[in-house]
Image (cartoon, rainbow, N blue to C red):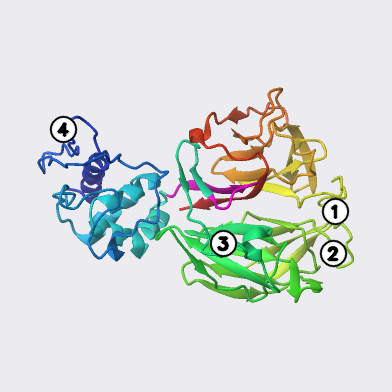
Amino acid sequence: MSKAYVVAEGMDYYQEMLTLGQDHTGRVRASSSRSRPRKVRIREYKIPDLNADPCLDMDEEDTGEVVGFRPQDADYSLNVPQLPYELEVEILARLPRFEYWKLKFLNKRFSRLLKEGKIFKVRRDRGVVEPSVFMRSHGDTKWTMFDKNFENYQEVPELPLPSDSSFFLGDKESLCAGTHLIVTGNEGESIALWRYELETSKWFKGPAMITPRILFASATCGSVAFVAGGLKMYGETSKEVVNEAEKYDSRTKTWTRLRGMNKRRQFCSGCFLRGKFYVLGGKDENDKNLTCGERYDEGTDTWELIPNILKDTSFSSIQSPPLLAVVNENLYSLETSANELRVYDTNANAWKKLGDVPVRAKSNGGWGVAFRSLGDKLLVIGESVGPSRTETMSVYTCRPSANREEKLLWEESKGCCGVKLSHFILNCCVMIA
């Protein structure tokens, strides 16, 4: 019997185990011929969905009690066949990631498998990763994680900070690397960094950047993230625009210093395109708008200046950093002054106009709009340009083509699993895990 066959059979079995039935007998459905379904007696307990607290940690419960269950009323230790460790990981790595929270309700062994991180490593190695969108909008105190189709969501636990913390109340910047969500912001006279780990659904402080900063450019490539430029703070009054760059590795939880850019810049944006880290736009140390960009080659540890890459960009006093996204090795931008999607021609060092976008990016100079790549699609979130304006966010995706002759077909994600978030998006980043 081949390993692929065993993995496929195992996936079917675990999918059935994760489908917790709610019939009148309270039976947990596990219809595989390898085990007989067992009754679970539950009193006034609803099988949790993705709105449930993701921080449940069965390993840390002294009594082994699952919140909502009465231990004397329930037998939730299912008859799970003991498989070889490596095979078990291979099977679980192929399950949809938004089903993983259910593993904690099966037994402690599955919960430990998640925390070890091996499942996510196998997902990367086998190419079965999937994107998730982490987002925080105006008025929110915590992040919300959506699946790629905005059909499921999970609330990320709040940062473990006091309510009067300057970090909690101030502006923040976010990026993803591997299974880590990185959040930075001012905290008193310094810049703090927190990371959320998907494996444990918990927040940890640090590790700090080598050069702590805000208003920087960033880009993700698998398990690592690159940052460059930004504003370095010295107390409450002293500030410095920097050209320094570094790389974060989520596997080792460390930062590595890289060669600095040719120019100092803040309010800049980054992306990873064709194996290189691009940084575009921003303002220099004299608060002058920059129309040039730079690209970093990690193999040679060098930066190449790209003159006039933003020469046709309109700037305003309230202009946000450039809104950039990469799909199928093509670089796209949302030109906020015209509410227009453009694609970059690397050979001509010019941008081609592709058509309108369905959100109001112009009104606030690009602030409050999320523009990201989501697999083979472009994602844009904000206030709809339609006649029925609402206070909640609108989510649109499209599969773009670099051919200007093809009409853009934007699809709206209806309902967004019932989540009502403000249309003014403060933070948004995509995790591939």
Say if residue 180 shows up in the picture.
yes
State if disc 2 and disc 4 touch (CB < 8 Å).
no
Estimate the spatial distance between the alpha carbons at disc 4 and disc 2, rounded to whole Å: 68 Å
- Cα–Cα span, label 2 and label 1: 15 Å
At label 1, the amino acid type is Asn
Residue annotated with mark 3? 182
Specify start and end residues of the magenta stretch as a single range.
129-143
Mark toward the viewer: 2 or 1? 2
- Residue 311: in magenta span: no
Q: Residues within 10 Å of mark 4 (few under 14, many from 20)?
A: few
Q: Which residue is mark 2?
A: 284
Q: Nearer the viewer, mark 3 or mark 4?
A: 4
Q: CA distance from mark 1 to mark 4?
A: 69 Å
In which image quadrant can residue 114 be found? bottom left
- Mark 4 or 2: the one toward you: 4
Is 134 one of the magenta-colored residues?
yes
Foreground of the two, 287 or 28: 28
Examine the rendered structure and indicate whether residue 354 appears above or below residue 101: above
Q: Secondary structure at mark 3?
A: strand
State whether residue 188 is above or below residue 395: below
